[in-house]
Amino acid sequence: MGSVQIVTTILAAAITAVAVGLAVRAVMKMVAVIRLGQPAPERFTDKGTRTRTMLVETAGHTRMLKWSVVGAAHWFVMVGFIVLSLLVLEAYFEVVTPAGGLPIIGHWTIFGLATELIGILGLAGILVLMAIRLRNRPARPGNRSRFTGSTMWQGYFVEWVVLLVLIFGFVIRGFKVATDHFEYPVWATPLSHAVGAALPAWTAGVSVAALIKIVISMTWLIVISLNVTMGVAWHRFLAFFNIFFKREPAKAAGSGLGPLRPMMSDGKPLDFEEADPEKDQFGVAQVEQFSWKGLLDFSTCTECGRCQSQCPAWNTGKPLSPKLLVLSLRDHAYAKAPYLLAGGGKDLTGEEKATAAQLAHMDVLALAEADRPLIGTAEEGGVIDPDVLWSCTTCGACVEQCPVDIEHVDHIVDMRRYQVLIESSFPSEAGVMLRNLENKGNPWGAPQNTREDWTKGLDFEVPRVGEVEDFEYLFWVGCAGAFEDRAKKTTRAVATLLNEAGVKFAILGEGETCSGDPARRIGNEFVFQMLAQQNVETLNEAFEGREKAKRKIVATCPHCFNTLGNEYGQLGGEFEVVHHTQLLAHLVSTGKLTPVQPVDGGVTYHDPCYLGRHNRVFAAPREVLGSAIGGGAGDGQGGAAAISGAGRDSGLIEMPRNSERSFCCGAGGARMWMEEKIGKRINVDRVEEAMATGAKTVAVGCPFCSTMLNDGVNGKGAGEQVEVIDVASVLLRSVKPDTAPGEKETAPVAG
Ligand code: SF4
Ligand code: SF4
């Protein structure tokens, strides 16, 4: 060992010892913070599926690749990071001797070839990511950036570290080539040989370059260890765990979509019959009341801003960004952690748990952080502003886009639950809806004995459950479908089509009450449980003696469809629920319904969030529309042609934001019953997009989307040019052109 190698070895050992020591301390701190969360035993079930999903999602980058260029570049950087970590390890041999290398595999040509290729692709990948970050930087004039609010220096720092480590990998190899210490052939390592041809034959160069590479890598480790909230770096380790522990590991996409997580206390679903707010946790009022998985979610956020770029609230100028919400919760949790770890915290009656002695030497900043209300205005020092909390439509676009499976909607609703159930604090205009649900069983407060009024004037009988025994489908009408004028036309259209196709169906009539979706999404779990239990009892009675496969329900409202199909199981109600567009698609493809009259003027389709993103029903409505537009029986391909763009040929014109990336109408999450006072109206934004397609018909599959888009169209004074209408009504016009003239859904808006 020469004098240069003695120095490089000592320096490499010293900086590594410091970095590893700090990293161990940082990991311990992070684990301690995450363990402050509430138990979540359900996250440890089905480890086989969890492992498989985690490996597929990480190795295959299945979620990142939705953003093709970024995803591909990130994949190369990730693989580069993992494989080239071996080359950082190799650098420790090279600081000792220029001929040093990894034992055994370091002599394999295949290893030299693989690392060369990954190094080159990693270089290309990181340059692409750097260019994308620079092009999208928030400071760029006129730029509406997904990185707004992200800690930009951290992103730049991480990218430069990756770039320099990759470059110095080739410099080391170059010096080895130049000094004849390199054993791989030119064909396997062309770039290394090219670099070597440009470098002098300086033997110490190998060890010096190796030291620089180690210093850069360890500086990175020191910096991230001193910044435990640096998600852009830590997600490289945490993402594996966050994906492994996701809510529904069997779901290929949208694990945090569909049903809401039940209200939990101490790791168990809350039983409202026995629940006591002084002993049981009602929602989330303090950051440590999130489950440990929630705290892991916050720690894992990469600050990539994909969620923010898709959020309807953020895109229409509201203060909610799912990314900034997650970052606020993360920063608060870590800043409050010293106080909590010292024994501090409030019990469920609001009393301080720590003794004065425990808090005597507490950092004042941690104490100040602990005093902040989780939900509060800037003047109150709140972590999350009420306007942020109540702007969410629970559309799920954030969950859909998040590459590390963060479950934003569950966290938002958990915070709403405490505000509604304990603080009675929510937008006052929604109070009428909640009172109507409690007293009348529907959000409009309509008399229960008018639930069947929509059947009046139909030229066939609509049977009630109990009147007929052999119905195949229970037609769940829903409150909108029973009481709201436009939605009633959809209900009539569906009933007419089912009757035409010879489907045996029956309704509950006055036995039906609201599914409870708006109560649950606003956070009033108590009212949801009350309505849901009543409905589950009624439905179980209606299907008595039938196995699950024969307990079939068809619903026109995606919110009911989601609640009945995905959430009633939490209360002992197991049913096979389909959306009417699915049943209609089946009836068309099996020849039970035959569209004869083509729909002209162009049709575009708006995916309802709770049908599409939350429940992955994208194809069926497109297939129905494709068949009606063409005036034929469809392609029988589940509308795949329409989705792929061939739909344009048959008249279905896709909006730029469609399917998984569809843009909310603004009504979900009980926003239907709240005023939209901040920013641009979400429905107007969506209507502008729909109108820009030039289509004369905007087809929908949800009564709330229908209301919102109709209001948007009428607000623009375009009610005469553009019609917003349910998929079922489009099909009815095509199947029975003579009997559907009165089904036009566009109605003038009062005032
Ligand atoms: S659910 Fe929709 S509205 Fe709510 S934060 Fe996510 S993207 Fe935004
Ligand atoms: S998409 Fe996920 S990782 Fe990216 S900023 Fe949003 S929450 Fe964080």
Image: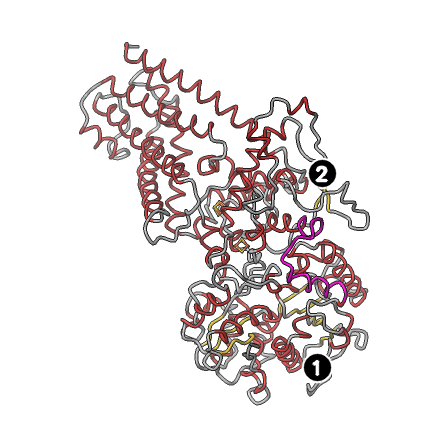
Q: Residue 431 at x, y = what percent?
A: 68, 61
From what the image shows, is residue 87 above or below residue 412? above
- Our reading of the magenta stretch's main secondary structure is helix
Give me the C-alpha separation between circle 1 and circle 2. Answer: 53 Å
Q: Nearer the viewer, residue 197 or 534?
A: 534
Q: Nearer the viewer, residue 737 or 132?
A: 132
Q: Quadrant of the C terminus?
A: bottom right
Q: Nearer the viewer, residue 700 or 190?
A: 700
Q: Residue 345 at x, y = what percent?
A: 67, 33
Name which residue type carries label 2. Gly
Label ID, residue 350: 2
Q: Which residues are magenta?
A: 418-439
Q: Residue 580 at x, y = what percent?
A: 62, 71
Which residue corresponds to the image point at 63% horizontal and 63% vertical from the top-left?
A: 559
Which residue corresponds to the image point at 63% horizontal and 31% vertical from the top-left?
A: 340
Question: What secondary structure is found at the residue carrying circle 2?
Answer: loop
Q: Is mark 1 within 8 Å of ligand 1?
A: no
Decide if residue 224 is on the left or right side of residue 496: left
Q: Which residue is mark 1?
A: 455
In terms of image quadrants, where is residue 615? bottom right
Which residue corresponds to the image point at 62% horizontal and 64% vertical from the top-left?
A: 673
From what the image shows, is residue 542 above or below residue 201? below
Name which residue type carries label 1. Thr
User: Depth-wise, is mark 1 or mark 2 nearer the camera?
Assistant: 2
Task: Give the residue furthest to the front.
Answer: 379
Question: What secondary structure is found at the residue carrying circle 1?
Answer: helix
